[in-house]
Amino acid sequence: MNIKDAYIGSAVQGKVYTCFVPESTTLPFMVMPDAINALLILEATPAKNLTQVVYNIGAFSVSAKDFYEMIKKAFPIAEVNFKPDPLHKKIVDSWPADLDDPLARKEWGWSHEFDSKRAFDEYSIPAVKQRYGK
């Protein structure tokens, strides 16, 4: 189970989730359909069009507070306590808040289909509801 599932899963089950980062912490996210699509597009791109072997790809970034607000809309009983843990916060603070992907967009036409609203409304929330029978 990943952090997103624990976070949303707790909301579905009416459990309080303790978030180990501050509300302002912002991280990049991507849903699996976009990740798979990126791999398929990259694989289909002729090698002559590529200038490197590793590319950043991005979709959207959300803060922990924004994440909670989206969950709260779908699961009004959701409750999150923000209690930053210094060790986890230090790790998360070393990650980028967003990804720089213009080279992937230029060289092989990368473009995400899911923004944060669509990712939650059409992918994450339905998947969690199905998993927990809600």
Image: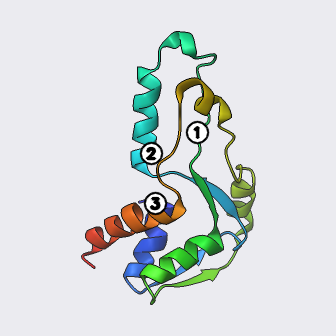
Q: How packed is label 2: few (under 14 Cα within 10 Å), some, or many (20 or more)?
A: some
Q: Mark 3 to mark 2: distance in Å?
A: 10 Å
CB within 8 Å, label 1 to label 2: no
Quarter holding residue 62: bottom right
Quarter holding residue 124: bottom left
- The secondary element bearing badge 2 is classed as helix
Residue lying farthest top? 48
The quadrant of the image that shows the N terminus is bottom left
Residue lying farthest bottom? 77
- The secondary element bearing badge 3 is classed as helix
Q: Amino acid at mark 3?
A: Ala
Q: Amino acid at mark 1?
A: Ile
Image point (39%, 69%), residue name: 125
Image point (56%, 49%), residue name: 59
The residue singled out by tag 2 in the image is 34
Q: Is residue 13 left or right of residue 53?
A: left
Q: How packed is label 3: few (under 14 Cα within 10 Å), some, or many (20 or more)?
A: many
Q: Amino acid at mark 2?
A: Asp
- The secondary element bearing badge 1 is classed as loop
Residue 86 circle label: none
Q: Mark 1 to mark 2: distance in Å?
A: 10 Å
Image point (69%, 40%), residue name: 100
Sequence-earlier tag: 3 or 1:
1
The residue singled out by tag 1 in the image is 57
Residue 65, placed above or below residue 77:
above
The quadrant of the image that shows the C terminus is bottom left
**Residue 42: x percent and y percent?**
47, 26
